[in-house]
Amino acid sequence: MAKNASTRYTVQEFCNNANWSDATKKNYKYALLNYARFLFPDKKDPDAALSALNQHVCKTINPAKDIGNYATFMKGKPPKTVGLYLTAVRSFYGLNGHVFNKQELKRIVPKAGDAETKQGELTTDMLRRMVGAADIRARVLIMLLASTACRIGELCAVALDDVNMNSKPPSIHLRKEITKNKRERTVFLTDEAKEVLAIWLGGERLKYLQASYLRNEGLNDQFRDKKRQLPENDRRLLGLSTFGARAIWYNTLSRVVDKDTLKPDAKTRIHPLSPHVVRKWWRITANQGFRNEDYAHLLMGHWNNSLDYVYARIGVAGLGKEFLKAQPALSILTSESTKELRENVDKQADRLLSLERENEKMRNEMETLKRIILFTDEQKK
Protein backbone atom coordinates (compact mmCIF):
# COMPACT_ATOMS: atom_id res chain seq x y z
CA MET A 1 0.00 0.00 0.00
CA ALA A 2 1.31 3.43 -0.87
CA LYS A 3 2.23 5.79 1.91
CA ASN A 4 0.10 8.86 2.39
CA ALA A 5 1.59 12.15 1.22
CA SER A 6 3.23 14.45 3.73
CA THR A 7 4.07 17.29 1.33
CA ARG A 8 1.67 18.97 -1.03
CA TYR A 9 2.61 20.19 -4.49
CA THR A 10 -0.06 21.55 -6.77
CA VAL A 11 -0.33 20.62 -10.43
CA GLN A 12 0.97 24.08 -11.36
CA GLU A 13 4.04 23.69 -9.14
CA PHE A 14 4.64 20.20 -10.49
CA CYS A 15 4.50 21.39 -14.11
CA ASN A 16 6.84 24.34 -13.51
CA ASN A 17 9.93 22.10 -13.38
CA ALA A 18 12.78 24.23 -14.73
CA ASN A 19 14.49 21.18 -16.24
CA TRP A 20 11.55 20.41 -18.55
CA SER A 21 10.91 21.87 -21.96
CA ASP A 22 7.74 23.88 -22.60
CA ALA A 23 6.35 20.94 -24.56
CA THR A 24 6.89 18.53 -21.63
CA LYS A 25 5.24 20.94 -19.19
CA LYS A 26 2.25 21.33 -21.53
CA ASN A 27 1.90 17.57 -22.09
CA TYR A 28 2.15 16.74 -18.39
CA LYS A 29 -0.41 19.37 -17.47
CA TYR A 30 -2.83 18.02 -20.06
CA ALA A 31 -2.18 14.47 -18.79
CA LEU A 32 -3.06 15.50 -15.23
CA LEU A 33 -6.15 17.34 -16.46
CA ASN A 34 -7.27 14.20 -18.24
CA TYR A 35 -6.69 12.20 -15.04
CA ALA A 36 -8.60 14.77 -12.97
CA ARG A 37 -11.56 14.55 -15.34
CA PHE A 38 -11.48 10.76 -14.98
CA LEU A 39 -11.59 11.03 -11.18
CA PHE A 40 -14.13 13.88 -11.11
CA PRO A 41 -16.35 13.61 -14.22
CA ASP A 42 -18.73 16.23 -12.81
CA LYS A 43 -15.97 18.88 -12.84
CA LYS A 44 -16.36 20.29 -16.34
CA ASP A 45 -14.24 23.39 -15.78
CA PRO A 46 -10.48 22.63 -16.13
CA ASP A 47 -9.50 24.78 -13.14
CA ALA A 48 -12.13 23.11 -10.96
CA ALA A 49 -10.95 19.64 -12.01
CA LEU A 50 -7.29 20.43 -11.26
CA SER A 51 -8.22 22.02 -7.94
CA ALA A 52 -10.08 18.84 -6.98
CA LEU A 53 -7.02 16.79 -7.95
CA ASN A 54 -4.79 18.98 -5.77
CA GLN A 55 -7.02 18.16 -2.80
CA HIS A 56 -7.34 14.51 -3.71
CA VAL A 57 -3.61 13.81 -3.97
CA CYS A 58 -3.11 14.56 -0.27
CA LYS A 59 -6.17 12.68 0.98
CA THR A 60 -6.09 9.44 -1.01
CA ILE A 61 -4.72 6.37 0.74
CA ASN A 62 -4.57 4.08 -2.29
CA PRO A 63 -3.35 6.02 -5.34
CA ALA A 64 -2.16 2.83 -7.04
CA LYS A 65 -5.78 1.69 -7.31
CA ASP A 66 -6.82 5.03 -8.83
CA ILE A 67 -3.97 4.94 -11.36
CA GLY A 68 -4.67 1.30 -12.18
CA ASN A 69 -8.33 2.10 -12.90
CA TYR A 70 -7.17 5.04 -15.00
CA ALA A 71 -4.90 2.75 -17.01
CA THR A 72 -7.85 0.44 -17.67
CA PHE A 73 -9.96 3.43 -18.68
CA MET A 74 -7.35 4.44 -21.30
CA LYS A 75 -7.31 1.02 -22.95
CA GLY A 76 -7.45 1.50 -26.71
CA LYS A 77 -5.57 4.81 -26.71
CA PRO A 78 -2.22 5.02 -28.57
CA PRO A 79 0.54 3.31 -26.52
CA LYS A 80 2.76 6.40 -26.38
CA THR A 81 -0.14 8.51 -25.11
CA VAL A 82 -0.91 5.96 -22.37
CA GLY A 83 2.76 5.87 -21.38
CA LEU A 84 2.99 9.66 -21.21
CA TYR A 85 -0.19 10.06 -19.17
CA LEU A 86 0.67 7.34 -16.64
CA THR A 87 4.21 8.65 -16.24
CA ALA A 88 2.89 12.15 -15.52
CA VAL A 89 0.33 10.93 -12.95
CA ARG A 90 2.79 8.59 -11.24
CA SER A 91 5.42 11.35 -11.03
CA PHE A 92 2.87 13.77 -9.59
CA TYR A 93 2.00 11.34 -6.82
CA GLY A 94 5.69 10.62 -6.24
CA LEU A 95 6.48 14.32 -5.79
CA ASN A 96 3.73 14.48 -3.18
CA GLY A 97 5.35 11.73 -1.12
CA HIS A 98 3.59 8.59 -2.33
CA VAL A 99 5.92 5.58 -2.59
CA PHE A 100 4.74 2.56 -4.57
CA ASN A 101 5.83 -1.01 -3.87
CA LYS A 102 6.83 -3.51 -6.59
CA GLN A 103 3.41 -5.09 -6.80
CA GLU A 104 1.73 -1.72 -7.28
CA LEU A 105 4.26 -0.65 -9.87
CA LYS A 106 3.43 -3.68 -12.00
CA ARG A 107 -0.07 -2.34 -12.37
CA ILE A 108 0.66 1.33 -12.90
CA VAL A 109 3.83 1.22 -15.03
CA PRO A 110 2.77 1.14 -18.68
CA LYS A 111 3.75 -2.01 -20.55
CA ALA A 112 5.51 -1.66 -23.86
CA GLY A 113 2.82 -1.77 -26.51
CA ASP A 114 3.17 -3.87 -29.64
CA ALA A 115 1.33 -1.32 -31.79
CA GLU A 116 3.56 0.25 -34.40
CA THR A 117 2.63 2.70 -37.12
CA LYS A 118 3.42 1.39 -40.57
CA GLN A 119 5.14 4.32 -42.22
CA GLY A 120 4.07 5.29 -45.70
CA GLU A 121 6.44 5.59 -48.63
CA LEU A 122 7.38 9.19 -49.35
CA THR A 123 8.95 9.70 -52.76
CA THR A 124 10.83 12.55 -54.37
CA ASP A 125 8.00 12.90 -56.88
CA MET A 126 5.45 13.34 -54.04
CA LEU A 127 7.59 16.05 -52.47
CA ARG A 128 7.93 17.76 -55.85
CA ARG A 129 4.15 17.74 -56.33
CA MET A 130 3.61 19.04 -52.78
CA VAL A 131 5.95 21.96 -53.45
CA GLY A 132 4.07 22.69 -56.67
CA ALA A 133 0.73 22.73 -54.82
CA ALA A 134 1.96 24.87 -51.90
CA ASP A 135 1.99 28.58 -51.12
CA ILE A 136 5.28 30.19 -50.13
CA ARG A 137 4.90 29.39 -46.41
CA ALA A 138 4.18 25.69 -47.03
CA ARG A 139 6.88 25.59 -49.71
CA VAL A 140 9.62 26.86 -47.43
CA LEU A 141 8.52 24.41 -44.70
CA ILE A 142 8.67 21.43 -47.08
CA MET A 143 11.94 22.49 -48.68
CA LEU A 144 13.65 22.98 -45.31
CA LEU A 145 12.43 19.62 -44.02
CA ALA A 146 13.69 17.91 -47.18
CA SER A 147 17.06 19.71 -47.13
CA THR A 148 17.95 19.53 -43.42
CA ALA A 149 16.28 16.33 -42.15
CA CYS A 150 15.25 18.33 -39.06
CA ARG A 151 12.48 17.11 -36.82
CA ILE A 152 9.51 19.41 -37.27
CA GLY A 153 9.71 20.63 -33.67
CA GLU A 154 13.38 21.54 -34.13
CA LEU A 155 12.67 23.42 -37.33
CA CYS A 156 9.83 25.43 -35.78
CA ALA A 157 12.16 26.51 -32.95
CA VAL A 158 14.89 27.83 -35.28
CA ALA A 159 15.47 31.57 -34.90
CA LEU A 160 16.56 34.07 -37.53
CA ASP A 161 19.98 34.35 -35.86
CA ASP A 162 20.54 30.61 -36.33
CA VAL A 163 20.58 30.91 -40.14
CA ASN A 164 23.74 31.66 -42.12
CA MET A 165 22.87 32.30 -45.76
CA ASN A 166 26.45 33.35 -46.63
CA SER A 167 28.23 30.12 -45.74
CA LYS A 168 28.89 27.51 -48.39
CA PRO A 169 26.65 25.62 -48.25
CA PRO A 170 24.12 27.82 -46.36
CA SER A 171 23.63 26.48 -42.86
CA ILE A 172 21.29 26.43 -39.87
CA HIS A 173 22.67 26.05 -36.36
CA LEU A 174 20.42 23.95 -34.15
CA ARG A 175 20.97 25.01 -30.55
CA LYS A 176 21.07 22.21 -27.98
CA GLU A 177 17.99 23.57 -26.20
CA ILE A 178 15.83 22.93 -29.28
CA THR A 179 17.15 19.51 -30.34
CA LYS A 180 15.62 16.24 -29.19
CA ASN A 181 18.84 14.81 -27.72
CA LYS A 182 20.08 18.16 -26.36
CA ARG A 183 23.14 18.10 -28.63
CA GLU A 184 23.79 21.07 -30.87
CA ARG A 185 24.41 20.43 -34.56
CA THR A 186 24.62 22.23 -37.88
CA VAL A 187 22.50 21.32 -40.90
CA PHE A 188 22.78 22.59 -44.47
CA LEU A 189 20.59 23.89 -47.28
CA THR A 190 20.48 22.78 -50.89
CA ASP A 191 20.64 25.50 -53.55
CA GLU A 192 16.90 25.20 -54.21
CA ALA A 193 16.07 25.40 -50.50
CA LYS A 194 18.26 28.51 -50.25
CA GLU A 195 16.35 30.17 -53.10
CA VAL A 196 12.96 29.53 -51.49
CA LEU A 197 14.20 30.65 -48.07
CA ALA A 198 15.60 33.87 -49.59
CA ILE A 199 12.14 34.68 -50.99
CA TRP A 200 10.58 33.95 -47.58
CA LEU A 201 13.04 36.20 -45.76
CA GLY A 202 12.77 38.89 -48.41
CA GLY A 203 9.34 40.05 -47.21
CA GLU A 204 6.90 37.14 -47.35
CA ARG A 205 7.70 36.09 -43.77
CA LEU A 206 6.71 39.47 -42.31
CA LYS A 207 3.49 39.51 -44.36
CA TYR A 208 2.42 36.13 -42.96
CA LEU A 209 3.37 37.09 -39.40
CA GLN A 210 1.33 40.29 -39.64
CA ALA A 211 -1.70 38.44 -41.03
CA SER A 212 -1.40 35.78 -38.32
CA TYR A 213 -1.11 38.42 -35.59
CA LEU A 214 -4.18 40.31 -36.78
CA ARG A 215 -6.17 37.09 -37.07
CA ASN A 216 -5.22 36.18 -33.50
CA GLU A 217 -6.19 39.64 -32.21
CA GLY A 218 -9.64 39.23 -33.74
CA LEU A 219 -10.40 36.11 -31.69
CA ASN A 220 -12.31 36.01 -28.41
CA ASP A 221 -10.27 35.91 -25.18
CA GLN A 222 -11.09 32.22 -24.82
CA PHE A 223 -9.25 31.33 -28.03
CA ARG A 224 -6.70 34.13 -28.41
CA ASP A 225 -3.04 33.33 -27.84
CA LYS A 226 -2.12 35.95 -25.26
CA LYS A 227 1.60 35.20 -25.65
CA ARG A 228 1.65 36.04 -29.34
CA GLN A 229 4.43 38.52 -30.08
CA LEU A 230 4.27 41.51 -32.37
CA PRO A 231 5.45 40.52 -35.88
CA GLU A 232 8.55 42.72 -35.66
CA ASN A 233 9.52 41.09 -32.34
CA ASP A 234 8.96 37.48 -33.45
CA ARG A 235 12.43 35.99 -34.09
CA ARG A 236 11.23 32.56 -35.23
CA LEU A 237 12.38 31.70 -38.74
CA LEU A 238 9.04 30.22 -39.81
CA GLY A 239 6.78 31.92 -37.27
CA LEU A 240 4.94 28.61 -36.80
CA SER A 241 4.09 26.39 -33.87
CA THR A 242 4.61 22.65 -34.28
CA PHE A 243 0.84 22.24 -34.43
CA GLY A 244 0.54 24.85 -37.17
CA ALA A 245 3.41 23.33 -39.16
CA ARG A 246 1.82 19.89 -39.03
CA ALA A 247 -1.50 21.33 -40.18
CA ILE A 248 0.22 22.95 -43.17
CA TRP A 249 1.99 19.69 -44.00
CA TYR A 250 -1.22 17.60 -43.98
CA ASN A 251 -3.20 20.26 -45.84
CA THR A 252 -0.61 20.34 -48.63
CA LEU A 253 -0.30 16.55 -48.64
CA SER A 254 -4.07 16.19 -49.11
CA ARG A 255 -3.74 17.94 -52.49
CA VAL A 256 -1.44 15.30 -53.98
CA VAL A 257 -2.54 11.96 -52.47
CA ASP A 258 -5.86 10.10 -52.31
CA LYS A 259 -8.10 10.06 -49.23
CA ASP A 260 -7.19 6.50 -48.20
CA THR A 261 -3.54 7.50 -47.90
CA LEU A 262 -4.52 10.25 -45.47
CA LYS A 263 -6.17 7.89 -42.97
CA PRO A 264 -4.24 7.57 -39.66
CA ASP A 265 -3.19 4.20 -38.28
CA ALA A 266 -6.18 2.46 -36.63
CA LYS A 267 -4.22 1.48 -33.48
CA THR A 268 -1.73 4.29 -32.90
CA ARG A 269 -3.75 7.03 -34.64
CA ILE A 270 -0.52 8.31 -36.15
CA HIS A 271 -0.48 9.34 -39.79
CA PRO A 272 1.65 7.02 -41.98
CA LEU A 273 2.88 10.06 -43.94
CA SER A 274 3.62 12.37 -41.02
CA PRO A 275 6.32 15.06 -41.41
CA HIS A 276 8.72 12.68 -39.64
CA VAL A 277 8.68 10.43 -42.72
CA VAL A 278 10.73 13.10 -44.50
CA ARG A 279 13.67 12.04 -42.29
CA LYS A 280 13.36 8.47 -43.56
CA TRP A 281 13.27 9.75 -47.15
CA TRP A 282 16.28 11.97 -46.46
CA ARG A 283 18.37 9.14 -44.96
CA ILE A 284 17.70 6.78 -47.89
CA THR A 285 18.23 9.50 -50.50
CA ALA A 286 21.27 11.13 -48.89
CA ASN A 287 23.11 7.81 -48.61
CA GLN A 288 23.25 7.77 -52.41
CA GLY A 289 25.48 10.83 -52.26
CA PHE A 290 27.54 10.43 -49.07
CA ARG A 291 30.77 8.44 -49.12
CA ASN A 292 30.15 7.42 -45.51
CA GLU A 293 26.68 6.85 -44.06
CA ASP A 294 27.94 8.14 -40.71
CA TYR A 295 27.80 11.66 -42.19
CA ALA A 296 24.05 11.25 -42.77
CA HIS A 297 23.54 10.10 -39.17
CA LEU A 298 25.46 13.10 -37.84
CA LEU A 299 23.36 15.56 -39.83
CA MET A 300 20.17 13.82 -38.63
CA GLY A 301 21.22 14.18 -34.98
CA HIS A 302 21.95 10.51 -34.26
CA TRP A 303 24.74 10.24 -31.70
CA ASN A 304 26.85 7.47 -30.17
CA ASN A 305 30.51 7.06 -29.20
CA SER A 306 31.68 6.11 -32.69
CA LEU A 307 29.82 9.07 -34.24
CA ASP A 308 31.46 11.39 -31.70
CA TYR A 309 34.82 10.26 -33.07
CA VAL A 310 33.69 10.80 -36.69
CA TYR A 311 32.39 14.29 -35.85
CA ALA A 312 35.60 15.24 -34.06
CA ARG A 313 37.58 14.12 -37.12
CA ILE A 314 35.53 15.80 -39.86
CA GLY A 315 33.99 18.84 -38.09
CA VAL A 316 31.28 21.19 -39.39
CA ALA A 317 33.34 22.39 -42.36
CA GLY A 318 34.01 18.82 -43.45
CA LEU A 319 30.36 17.90 -43.15
CA GLY A 320 29.47 20.90 -45.30
CA LYS A 321 31.82 19.70 -48.05
CA GLU A 322 30.32 16.20 -47.90
CA PHE A 323 26.83 17.68 -48.04
CA LEU A 324 27.71 19.51 -51.26
CA LYS A 325 28.63 16.17 -52.82
CA ALA A 326 25.28 14.67 -51.75
CA GLN A 327 23.27 17.73 -52.80
CA PRO A 328 22.28 16.46 -56.29
CA ALA A 329 20.60 13.43 -54.73
CA LEU A 330 18.64 15.65 -52.30
CA SER A 331 17.35 18.06 -54.95
CA ILE A 332 13.59 17.58 -55.31
CA LEU A 333 12.79 20.17 -57.98
CA THR A 334 15.40 18.91 -60.42
CA SER A 335 14.23 16.32 -62.95
CA GLU A 336 15.64 12.79 -62.84
CA SER A 337 17.31 13.22 -66.23
CA THR A 338 19.16 16.32 -65.01
CA LYS A 339 20.21 14.49 -61.85
CA GLU A 340 21.59 11.61 -63.91
CA LEU A 341 23.43 14.07 -66.15
CA ARG A 342 24.99 15.77 -63.12
CA GLU A 343 26.00 12.42 -61.65
CA ASN A 344 27.56 11.37 -64.95
CA VAL A 345 29.46 14.66 -65.18
CA ASP A 346 30.75 14.17 -61.63
CA LYS A 347 31.81 10.60 -62.46
CA GLN A 348 33.56 11.76 -65.61
CA ALA A 349 35.33 14.52 -63.67
CA ASP A 350 36.52 11.97 -61.09
CA ARG A 351 37.67 9.68 -63.89
CA LEU A 352 39.52 12.52 -65.61
CA LEU A 353 41.27 13.43 -62.36
CA SER A 354 42.26 9.79 -61.90
CA LEU A 355 43.66 9.63 -65.46
CA GLU A 356 45.63 12.84 -64.91
CA ARG A 357 47.19 11.35 -61.78
CA GLU A 358 48.06 8.15 -63.64
CA ASN A 359 49.53 10.19 -66.48
CA GLU A 360 51.64 12.20 -64.06
CA LYS A 361 52.85 8.98 -62.45
CA MET A 362 53.83 7.54 -65.86
CA ARG A 363 55.67 10.75 -66.79
CA ASN A 364 57.66 10.56 -63.57
CA GLU A 365 58.49 6.93 -64.24
CA MET A 366 59.61 7.80 -67.80
CA GLU A 367 61.86 10.57 -66.50
CA THR A 368 63.38 8.15 -64.01
CA LEU A 369 64.08 5.61 -66.79
CA LYS A 370 65.68 8.30 -68.97
CA ARG A 371 68.02 9.27 -66.13
CA ILE A 372 68.94 5.63 -65.56
CA ILE A 373 69.69 5.14 -69.27
CA LEU A 374 71.81 8.30 -69.43
CA PHE A 375 73.72 7.28 -66.31
CA THR A 376 74.35 3.79 -67.78
CA ASP A 377 75.61 5.26 -71.09
CA GLU A 378 78.00 7.57 -69.27
CA GLN A 379 79.38 4.65 -67.24
CA LYS A 380 80.08 2.69 -70.44
CA LYS A 381 82.06 5.59 -71.88
Image: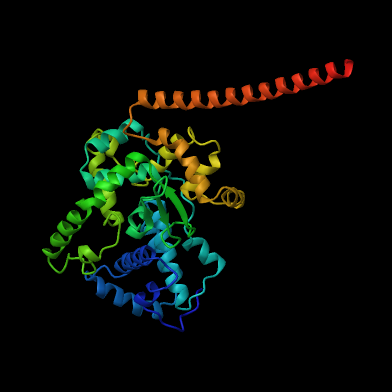
Residue nearest the observer in this picture, 166 or 19:
166
Q: How is the image coloured?
A: rainbow
Q: What x and y, as percent, mark residue 167?
A: 41, 49
Residue 207 visible? The answer is: yes
- State the residue at coordinates (45%, 61%): 176
Residue nearest the observer in this picture, 216 or 298:
298
- 118 versus 8 height, above or below: above
Horizontal side, residue 274 vs residue 321: left or right: left
Q: What x and y, as percent, mark residue 180?
A: 44, 56
Residue nearest the observer in this picture, 64 or 293:
293
- State the residue at coordinates (29%, 49%): 246
Q: In which quarter of the image is the C terminus?
A: top right
Horizontal side, residue 288 vs residue 72: left or right: right
Image mark count: 0
- State the residue at coordinates (45%, 23%): 344
Horizontal side, residue 133 vs residue 375: left or right: left
For this orientation, the residue located farthest to the front is 381
Residue nearest the observer in this picture, 234 or 222:
234
Examine the image and state in which quarter residue 142 appears: top left
Examine the image and state in which quarter residue 282 appears: top left
For this orientation, the residue located farthest to the bottom is 6
Q: What x and y, as percent, mark residue 15?
A: 38, 72
For this orientation, the residue located farthest to the right is 380
Q: What x and y, as percent, mark residue 374?
A: 79, 19
- 177 versus 10 height, above or below: above
Residue 248 visible? The answer is: no
